Every structure is written in structure tokens, then in C-alpha cells.
Amino acid sequence: MLRKRLLIPLILSLVTFGLVVACNSGTPTGQTNPSPAENAATAAIPIGAALAQTSNLALLGQEQVIGVKMAETYFNKKGGVNGTPIKVIIQDVTGDEPGAINAINTLITKDKVVGILGPSLSQQAFAASPIADRAKVPILGPSNTAKGIPQIGEYVGRVSAPVAVVAPNAVKTALKIDPKIKKVAVFFAQNDAFSKSETETFQETLKSLNLDIVTVQKFQTTDTDFQNQATAAINIKPDLVVISGLVADGGNLVKQLRQLGYQGLIIGGNGLNTSNIFPVCQAQCDGIIIAQAYNPELDSPINRDFVAAYTAENKKAPPQFTAQAFTGIQVFVEALKRVDDKNKLSTLSLEQIRQQLNQEILAGKYVTVLGDIAFTPEGEIIQDKFSVAQIKMDADGKNGKFTFVKN
């Protein structure tokens, strides 16, 4: 009888322990991550980041990864989402469309994120963002500036201003530096959707300013030898060169243009808008003009915090791609707070969180490192602060900085 009395409490305690574990796990068999609704009280809220960490896009994606990690740290220190921390889950989109598709599928189905920042390229967004839209997962492009990105679907937006708004500023600045500019040579990467969209804007701007486009030279983002295109352009003696490409190919093109004797002004598109271009074209980077959607000199509390944190770690001013990635995570955090204010996340299914999150993203206004931003009903960013910078390389050609041109 004594043995029976001892066994009964033991069995009851084991059963109770099993129930507690089952209830607290929140993870059905075969599911690797609990949804926010299943574990909102204790687990971090997963936000996806589909960014390039390998391939020829790594120079761009590395800056974006820094931005999302900074945002995770910064906003968690400020309480996360009404007391619940966020967790940024990063998947590598590599350098092509299949890589972006795989990354976004993984974030949606395996990682069960509430929303996604990415992918790195417009070309990838046209292939992969429709997947997020069909799954009704809000996705924000951090550097997708090609025409037509927000129109992909109801759940697709971007925190990167469209090239049609930003690029013309660079041409106008070049004319202020040298009012005698007349003949322009245009180069663009024909295998990249963003570069094709950007060059259209550049060419429209040049024509509207009565400048003469004397040649249009095409290349691939994977090219390393540009001597044929560069020589053909130099022989026409242009006053200005405009390049739409990515950092590796664009930087090499700049280098070879200078080595072959071109001495005029060069405008680089948004794909060249990173300090990672410095080791590519080195001393020949000097003088490149690039329009900016971010200015580290913006005087606001959040930007001062952002610049101080980035500079302390990297010993230089933060670049645009890092700032835009940081802003994307901020938008998710602030929109999630408003969802939680109206209906506690712990009471909502993952599908409901995603749906309400998308609604709050589009309805919100945000004070960011980019300045004050908002969104149109179709997900286009509304931003009014833009700048233009010119690269100034050190005497040894190893390091440089973006010097902002005063309007």
C-alpha cells in the first residue's frame, strides 16, 4: 500500500511535467520554429532578411546585413515590440533569382517569419517577391529601385526610393560642376533589371537637359574586361560618362576608363553607391558622382544614434545600403507595435499577424535615419530628403569617403 501511495504522486508529476513541456514547446512535430502567436509571450518575433552574402552581390549585401543586425540590437534595447524582442533571421539570396526564391521560401515556410526585408536586387525581387505576395507575407525591398517593384502585389513595398526620383539629381549636380558638358557616354548592365531601369531614367534626364548621348555601351554584371566598350566611348570624346551597374563590374569599368585616358566626370548609379567600391577602382574612384537617398549628416536623434553606433564599429560614416536596411527593420518593428496595441500578437494566428502587419506598414508614418517617410497605398516609399555625393579618395588610393555636395 505504501508503494502504491508513493507511485501515484510520481505518476501525476510526470504527467504534469509532460503537459507543461507540450504546452510550452508551441512547436508541432516537423515544425522548426513556433509562430509568434504560439509563443508570443516569451519568444522573439521572427523577421526575415533575404540578403546577398555570397556571389558578386556580397559587397552590397554585406552592408545590408550590418544594417539589419544594428537594427535588431538597437530596437531590442528600446523594448522590441511592446516588450517582446525581435529576432532577424537572415537567409542568403546569393547572386541570382533562384537564390532569392529559395531564401524567401525558406523564410516563409520554415522560419515562419512575420515579414521579410529583401531581396537585395530588383532583378531578384521581380522573381521572388511574388512568392511572398501569394503567401500574404509583407515584403519590403531595401535596395529595389527599379520601376514596377511596388506594383508586384498587395504585400510588396520598398524603403528604397525609386531610381526615377533619385538619379536625376546626379546629372544636375554634374552640370553645376561643369556647365560645359554636352556629349555623354552611357554604360549599363543589360542583364540586370535595376540597371536597365536606371539607365532609362538617366537617358530621359540627359535628353530633357538637351545633352547629347553620343554612345550607349552594354555589358554584363559578370564582366571584368571593359576595354572594348571603354575605348569605343573614349574615341568619341565624351564630356560625361554615366554608368548603371553593380559595384564589382561598375568599379572595374571606372578603373579601365581612367587607365585608358578618360579624364571627364563620371556619374555612378545606385549600384556603385557603397564604400566597397574603393578597393575595386582604388585611386580611379576619385570624383565619381552618386545620388544619395541617405545622408549621414542628417541631424535627428535616431540618425545621430545610428551614425555613432556604426562609426564606433567601422571607423567610417554609414553607407546608404546599411541605412536603408536599418530603416526596413524599423518599419516592421513600429508596425508590429501598432498591431499589438490593437490586438495582442499572442491572440492572433501567424496569418492574421502578417495580414494586419501589412496594413499597418502602409498606414504608418516613420521618423527614420532616411528622414520622415511613409508609403503610398501600393507600397511605394514617400521620401523627400535626397543628396548627392562625390567620392574623394585618399592620396594612397586605398581609402576614401563620400563627400556631400552642397546644393
Image (cartoon, rainbow, N blue to C red):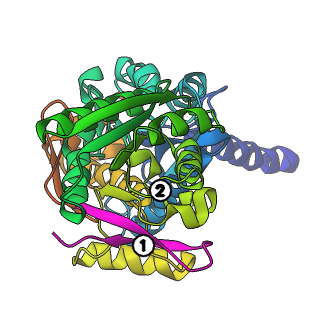
Question: Is 115 on the left-hand or right-hand side of 73?
Answer: left
> Is 261 drawn above or below residue 312 in the view shown?
above
Residue 138 appears in the rendering: no
> Looking at the image, is mark 1 or mark 2 earlier in the sequence?
2
> Is 9 drawn above or below residue 15 in the view shown?
below
Residue 132 appears in the rendering: yes
User: Going by the picture, which residue comes out furthest to the top?
Assistant: 134
The residue beneath circle 2 is 68
**Viewer-closest of 391 and 72:** 391
State how many labels appear: 2
Magenta highlight on residue 278: no
Q: Residue at x 50, y 24 (%)?
A: 191
Dividing the picture into quadrants, the one containing residue 23 is top right
- Number of other residues with Cα within 10 Å of mark 1, as a class: few under 14, some 14 to 19, many 20 or more: few
The residue beneath circle 1 is 77
Q: Position of residue 182 (x, y in %)?
A: 23, 46
Q: Residue at x 46, y 50 (%)?
A: 272
Give the label, 1 or 2, closer to the camera.
Answer: 2
Looking at the rendered image, the quarter that the N terminus falls into is top right
**Viewer-closest of 317 and 285:** 285
Q: Amino acid at mark 1?
A: Lys
Q: Amino acid at mark 2?
A: Val
> Is 47 drawn above or below residue 30 in the view shown?
below
Dividing the picture into quadrants, the one containing residue 209 is top left
Q: Which mark is residue 277?
A: none
Task: Please report the bounds of the magenta region as a residue range.
Answer: 386-407
Q: Position of residue 310 (x, y in %)?
A: 47, 74
